[in-house]
Image (cartoon, rainbow, N blue to C red):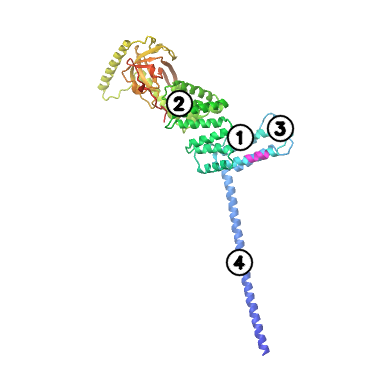
Amino acid sequence: MTTPTRLEDLESAIEEVSTRLKDLKSIIEEVSTDQKDLKSTNEEVSTHLKDLKSAIIEVSTHQKDLKSAIEEVSTHLNESNPSLKMSTPTEEVSREKGQVSADRKSNIEQVCTHLKESNYDHWISTVTKLAEWLYRFCDQHFPSTTQQRISDIERQIDLCIDVLESVPQVPDVYKEKAERYLVNATQLNPFLLEAWDCLALCVAKKGDYKRAKNCYKFVLKMGGESSRILRQIAHLELINARVPGNPAKHVDKCIKYAQRTLALDDKDGDILGCAYFTSFLLNGGWDHNNLQVAFGEYEKAMKIDAMKSSPYLQYDYSTVTRYLENYKESLIGFSDAAVKNPASDASHQVKVTVQLLDKLIELLQGKHKDKSKGKNKRKSKRKSTETSLSSLIQSLANIDLNPSYKRATVDLLTEGFNEQIEVVAAVRCLVKYEYKAPVYYMLCDSDENSFVLAVFGIQKEAIKQGDQVTLLDPICKFVDFEWEGKHYEFKSVRVNLLEQVLVNGNPLPPSSAMRDSIMQN
């Protein structure tokens, strides 16, 4: 009985061992499978990494991003000014002469080009890296003398400024996210004036001018007088003056802030010119003193190198010169502004001005085309008009002379202000054109001399065709210039006030005054 029992135990043990061997084999196979899967995964990851690396290389190659450009500049700059290295005599002579290597200049220009072609995310990253490099250069560059070190650092700063000047302006678009971050910055550090400054600029973009002004005023209060901040406030007042409400109040404030700006920086005259010009337009154009002040301030600004290339300044300056009847200067300015800023309507202003001048010349030369239908009707109407005008001119001699004035025909006027002189003339017609001021009329004096009358501050309905007008203290302008092959030559007389005009022997009523804005939309 003992032997069979032992055999059974042995068989049982063998089966158990066999089962365990099968389990072990299964585990080994499972481990082997896992190893294969892991190897496959590693190969797949390696493939993805290679693809990613290839993509990065391809992007870097094809796009030539700004980061690589800046690193290239940094390398060249470091090579030309290695840290902790004594300068050679040649390098010292080069520094004394203020020379910069061609390679360094070339790479700075390359970065400038990349900046102009890149989006804002790119240049923000690039400029950040450039600033970091500049700090490292300042910390590590120690040539033979302190003066040389200062000179080298200043030169690198100038080169970096060249790059910064290539950065395009931030689009004039409001960003809610930007406002949120700036508000957080002012809350974390209420005395961080740069944050308040940026917040003012941000909220102004969404039209919250009152809040923007408060931000700027806080900067002034905490940081003291600043021409840049004062200019920004003046600009906000100018914007407020162009919306319904109390424009005169805002214009006056703008002028005061602009004057404070000029007291700190006499090269900031365009804002004062803009303030006086806006005042002239908003008040109906009757106060020519404001126009003259605006012209003077714009003229000063045009002599400043940093400002004379501005298309916005050129546009405003050209508009003022057109109001002063300096047509050639106005056309040149509008043409230049159109080239520098094709998005503006400067080219349209050239067209409008030329059309006006052409119409004036046609009327002066008697080439005005009658729009009546039928040849006989045109002849009949023209003959009737000529007879009426002729009799009207003859009757001018019957108009009473103001005893304190001397009567003169237009050919006797001198250029400029003709004090105590009066000119009596008949109104041939109103000259229609795009804008409502000045109002132009074609007149004829007692000697049958045709001339242009430019009227400011008076509604066009106050003077009509066939009226007899007496012009007191007229301002005369001799126009004589060529433009694109055409010769423009005529005399223009200007009046600015109701008191300068008598219609059919009578003064104009106060209701004839132009008090509404003549600002172009």
Residue 295 included in the magenta stretch of the image: no
Q: Is residue 497 left or right of residue 62?
A: left
Query: What amino acid is found at the position of numbered circle 1 in the picture?
Result: Ile
Sequence-wise, the earlier of marks 1 and 4 is 4
Residue 438 placed where, x, y %? 40, 23
The residue wearing badge 3 is 148
Sequence-wise, the earlier of marks 4 and 2 is 4
Query: What amino acid is found at the position of numbered circle 4 in the picture?
Result: Thr
Q: Circle 3 sits in a helix, a strand or a loop, which is it?
A: helix
Q: Label for residue 33? A: 4
* Mark 1 vs mark 2, CA separation in Å: 38 Å
Residue 83 placed where, x, y %? 71, 39
Q: Which residues are magenta?
A: 131-137
Q: Label for residue 161? A: 1
The residue wearing badge 2 is 279
* Mark 1 vs mark 4, CA separation in Å: 62 Å
Q: Magenta stretch: dominant SS?
A: helix
